[in-house]
Image (cartoon, rainbow, N blue to C red):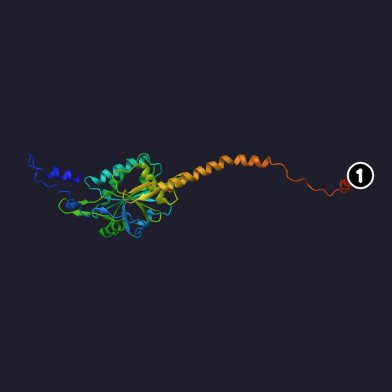
Amino acid sequence: MAASMLLCLTAPAAAQPTDNVQLNDGVPAQAEGVTVDQHLGTTLPLELEVVDASGKTVPLQTYFDGRRPVIVTLNYSDCPMLCSVQLNALTRSLNDVDLKMGDDFQLLTVSIDPDEATERIRETKQLYTDQVNKQPQAAEAWHFATASQSTITKLTDTLGFRYRYDKQTKQYNHPAMLAFVSPEGVISSYSLRVDFPPEDLKRSLVAAGEGTIGSPVDVIVMWCFSYDPNRGRYVATAWKLMRLGGALTIGVILLALTPYWIGKRRQSPQLAEPITDDPHTHEATTAFERKADE
């Protein structure tokens, strides 16, 4: 696909002989080094300070309360395409995910542009939270913030988010990334797609929540999934599914046999008569035995 796009951009208008044509399958110069190195298990530097959409300076710790997982995204308001594609897709999934923003999880979007103004980030927050109309707490649960270059550098390095500033276009070349972070600030998983199926979003949030969100059924279901860094999503694990299926089968069999075992025990005859110490009974037995001897 990339080679085709480059060919379309560089091909001459008139048809030319193709015997000696070589396609450029390399990575465009502006995209070199633009990637995400997944730092699973790494703790974010929660002491870093950002400026929220109201203009207040707060530490990252503000957004990690030890109870709710956090989705972290890195974008900027003047991004010409990728950020809007990514965040629009995210709003659609947030409307459909079977979890509640605010009650179950939060989001934090930090601008990678150190010159972005608070007023601009406030407008961006309004734009996207208004789209999440099925989540009543969207405005309170989705936080937008700006930061200094030193803070941005430390945060992006911790997340493994590799981007570049293009001086010619005055734009940032960056990947699409969602980082799912535990309530204590530990990176649990990533999504590196520009679309976010609601079921994938929920699995990643339940896993990042470490038992703090989701139903008992969700926790059991998540046991059957493992995070695949290459796909950037949770995938079903065959051996776990087989073990869970075997356990459920045994449980059903035991449940079905329980009434039979209970009924069988109640119907069992007494194996021995009770022994009595009544003297009259003993005398009658002795007399009967004496008469039999005569």
Residue 66 quadrant: bottom left
Q: Position of residue 258 (x, y in %)?
A: 59, 41
Q: Position of residue 210 (x, y in %)?
A: 43, 52
- Which residue is nearer to you in this view: 66 or 54? 66
Q: Is residue 283 left or right of residue 237?
A: right
On the question of residue 130 being in view, the answer is no
- From the top left corner, tell me how far across and down residue 63 is, in percent: 37, 53
Q: Determine the residue positioned at 34% across, 47% down.
A: 233
**Residue 43: quarter of image:** bottom left
To which residue does mark 1 refer? 291
Of 269 and 70, the residue lying toward us: 269
Quarter of the N terminus within the rendering: top left
Does any portion of residue 239 appear in the rendered image?
A: yes
The amino acid pointed to by label 1 is: Lys
Percent across and percent down for residue 224 are: 42, 47
Residue depicted at x 39% and y 49%:
226
Left or right: 44, with 274 as reference point: left
Instruction: For mark 1, give the secondary structure.
Output: helix
Image quarter where the C terminus lies is top right
